[in-house]
């Protein structure tokens, strides 16, 4: 009988698609802007709050 042959295959990941990276960057930027807007709106609402129970 013949000896078994071992085959080693190395696989490299595909290079990232520049269009997809740009889309993800835009999405992250929009998320960051939304988070800042929400935080600032909550701070403004807290600044003008007249609830005396919290004071």
Image: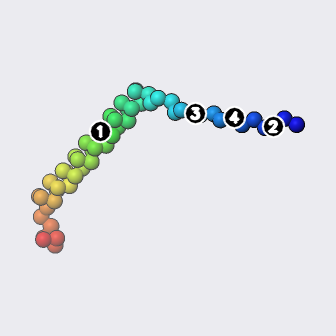
Task: Please provide percent x and percent y for residue 49.
Answer: 14, 61
Up-down: is 11 above or below 46? above
How packed mark 4 is, by other alpha carbons closer than 10 Å (few <14, some 14-19, many 20 or more), is few
The residue pinned by badge 3 equals: 11
Measured in 3D between alpha carbons, the distance from the residue under mark 3 to the one under mark 4, in whole angstroms, is: 13 Å
Q: Nearer the viewer, mark 1 or mark 2?
A: 2
Answer with left or right where residue 12 lies relative to residue 48: right
Mark 3 in CB contact with mark 2 (< 8 angstroms): no
How packed mark 1 is, by other alpha carbons closer than 10 Å (few <14, some 14-19, many 20 or more), is few
Q: Nearer the viewer, mark 3 or mark 1?
A: 3
Mark 3 in CB contact with mark 4 (< 8 angstroms): no
Answer with left or right where residue 25 lies relative to residue 36: right
The one nearer the camera, 40 or 12, is 12
Task: Please provide percent x and percent y for residue 16.
Answer: 44, 30
The residue under the point 18% across, 50% down is 40
The residue pinned by badge 2 equals: 3
The one nearer the camera, 55 or 2, is 2
The residue pinned by badge 4 equals: 7
Residue 4 badge: none
Measured in 3D between alpha carbons, the distance from the residue under mark 3 to the one under mark 2, in whole angstroms, is: 26 Å
The residue pinned by badge 1 equals: 29
* Dot 2: element: loop
């Amino acid at each position: 009988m013949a000896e078994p042959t071992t085959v080693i295959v190395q696989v490299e990941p595909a290079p990232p698609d520049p269009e997809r990276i740009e889309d993800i960057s835009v999405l992250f930027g929009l998320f960051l802007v939304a988070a800042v807007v929400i935080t600032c709106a909550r701070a403004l609402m807290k600044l003008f709050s007249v609830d005396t129970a919290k004071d």
